[in-house]
Amino acid sequence: MHTYKFKFSKPILILSIAAILLALGGGIGWTVYRIIRNHGFPTIVFGIQCVVLLLVSVLILVVFSALLIRSCYKITDTEVVLWFGIVPTRYKIADMESVHLFTKTNKLVIYFKNDKYTVIVVKPEWHNEFVKDLLSKNERIRYDVSTTDKDEDL
């Protein structure tokens, strides 16, 4: 089983890290400080606010941390598993018809038998290795490369 890390753009990385820091400092830190400053929960409304804010902050912390740590593609013997944070999506290798590399946009696209497709978002240096791993699991998958400006027409 081979693993290929997801390639995030710099703005997405920056926003994810900012969300984690905001959840830690602004959500959890500030709420705990308010609870300590008020010596607990003086009113029911304050208690509900603090609990909801803590839960939302922990959820943001878990989701964005998982996105940065666990986002990858795994190629097994029978399927390609996309782990996007804590959510896995499975694509059966037997259902794949072709893999196409659009060189103008540097996108690797997998086409399936049911007229669906998915775009593989890994480092461009890994495209050849990813395709070789995929083709080694199913020789019937066709591999194409577009080197012209006609990529938009497809």
Image: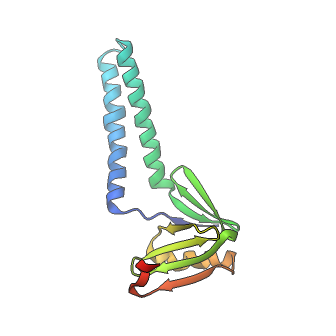
Q: Is residue 50 above or below residue 17?
A: above
Q: Quadrant of residue 53?
A: top left
Residue lying at the far bottom in this picture: please name it.
148
**Which of 93 and 154 lies nearest the eye of the viewer?**
154
Residue 88 locus on image (x, y percent): 58, 54
Q: Is residue 104 above or below residue 86?
A: below
Q: Quadrant of residue 8?
A: bottom left
Q: Is residue 136 above or below residue 83?
A: below
Query: Left of 132 or right of it: where is 94?
Result: right
Q: How is the image coloured?
A: rainbow
Give the tally of numbered discs.
0
Q: Residue at x 47, y 67 (%)?
A: 121
Residue lying at the far top in this picture: please name it.
42
On the rendered image, what quadrant is the N terminus found in?
Answer: bottom right
Query: Left of 134 or right of it: where is 27?
Result: left
Query: Left of 113 or right of it: where is 73?
Result: left
Q: Quadrant of residue 27?
A: top left
**Which of 106 and 35 lies nearest the eye of the viewer?**
106
Q: Residue at x 31, y 30 (%)?
A: 30
Residue 139 locus on image (x, y percent): 69, 81
Q: Residue at x 64, y 72 (%)?
A: 96
Residue 49 locus on image (x, y percent): 37, 23
Query: Left of 75 or right of it: where is 154?
Result: left
Q: Residue at x 53, y 80 (%)?
A: 128
Residue 57 locus on image (x, y percent): 40, 36
**Which of 127 and 37 lies nearest the eye of the viewer?**
127
Q: Is residue 145 above or below residue 138?
A: below
